[in-house]
Amino acid sequence: MRALRLTAWGRQPVLTEVELPVPQGSEVLVRVEAAGLCHSDVHVVDAAEGALPYRPPFTLGHEVAGHVAQLGPHAVGPAVGERVVLYGPWGCGACGRCAAGRDNYCDRRDTLSWHGAGLGRDGGMAEYVLVPSARHLVPIGDLPADQAAPLSDAGLTSYHAVAGLRRTLGESTTVLVIGIGGLGHLAVQILRVTTSSRILAVDIRQEALALAHRSGADFGTLLRPNTADIVRAQTGGAGLDAVLDFAGTEESLALAAGVLRPGGELAVVGSGGGHLTIRKPGFLPPGFRLSLPFWGTRTELAEVVALARSGAVHVETERFPLSTAAEAFGRLRQGGVRGRAVLVPD
Ligand code: FEH
Ligand code: ZN
Ligand code: ZN
């Protein structure tokens, strides 16, 4: 079968022929219908040797949907032919977190040479992907694969981040979403359908603000030197109850810190390399709360799939044949993808 493989650190991934895996034990073989392309894939490809615990060669792709092709002799779960999305964080499989379907916060994460499918283990930018256990599979019914695949990372990560703000986003609250890309546009939709908050959006691209509006944001503005004043004015000067930062840059973190009201909460999802100094006394509002949510739980994946199947969440995607993966990576690097790029085996 063909697979997009990271063969060594410092090399671009190559589309190459590999053996078709045969599922053993509780493993399940899935025929891939779509695999999303994430900024983390770019970070993995660009990583210097030793920066990540992964051991190339392995197949990329941690945002995968398809249908069950073959079950290992001890696999218990979806039947052959059932359409599924992969729960991508694969932890140790033995700690309490993993047993509870919270592999994203595996207690033994630091001992592993992988973080999941396509992240040190063979992933789904391929014709097939081998999954360690059916517990990593969530049924998707007739949801199109290019809609389902992005839910497993962009959707799940956004859903998990919003869930972490639940206690803050009550009645008469205002939330700011910074970065309206593959994750941010889904976060706006998830906020719209799961909270009653007013939703503000900030991005560096005008077309991203249009996407924010289509996704349900109440107001959008470009990131400029006076954006904090513009955003704060949307709250009558009181400030924001919460900020979801999908950029994580120096500018976005400074904006977030500058618009939160006392008791406000910042969730930083983006890995833009920015930093925020926590100092007391300092400039951060009293009661400031910070979280660094990572991916999500298996239960949350089933919940976000249910939202998509109900029509409440729709992913903006750009499809690329798997054979043009290099072009897709290039477009993502240039910030030229609207919504989420999805690779489809051709
Ligand atoms: C996965 C592995 C490591 C870092 C970041 C990620 C995210 O793409 C998962 O949402
Ligand atoms: Zn990702
Ligand atoms: Zn674990």
Image: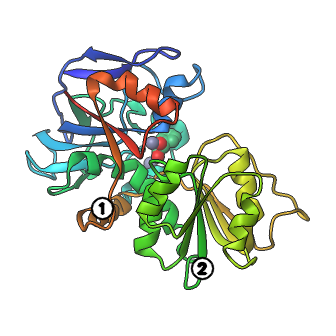
Residue 287, position as x, y percentages in the image: 76, 73
Q: In what quadrant of the picture does the N terminus appear?
A: top left
Whether residue 73 is visible: no
Q: Is mark 1 within 8 Å of ligand 1?
A: no
Please tell me whether mark 2 sits on a helix, a strand or a loop: loop
Residue drawn at x 77%, y 62% as measured from the top left: 258
Q: Which badge, 1 or 2, is on the more N-terminal residue?
A: 2
Q: Does 126 appear above or below 107?
A: above
- What kind of residue is marked 2? Thr
Q: In terms of secondary structure, where does tag 1 sit?
A: helix
Ligand 2 image position (quadrant):
top left
Q: Amino acid at mark 1?
A: Ala
Which picture quadrant has residue 288?
bottom right
Mark linked to residue 140: none
Q: Position of residue 243 (x, y in %)?
A: 63, 64
Instruction: Give the residue displayed 72% in from the left and 79% down from the top.
Output: 236
**Direction from residue 205 to residue 283 in the image, left or right:** right
Q: Residue at x 72, y 48 (%)?
A: 251
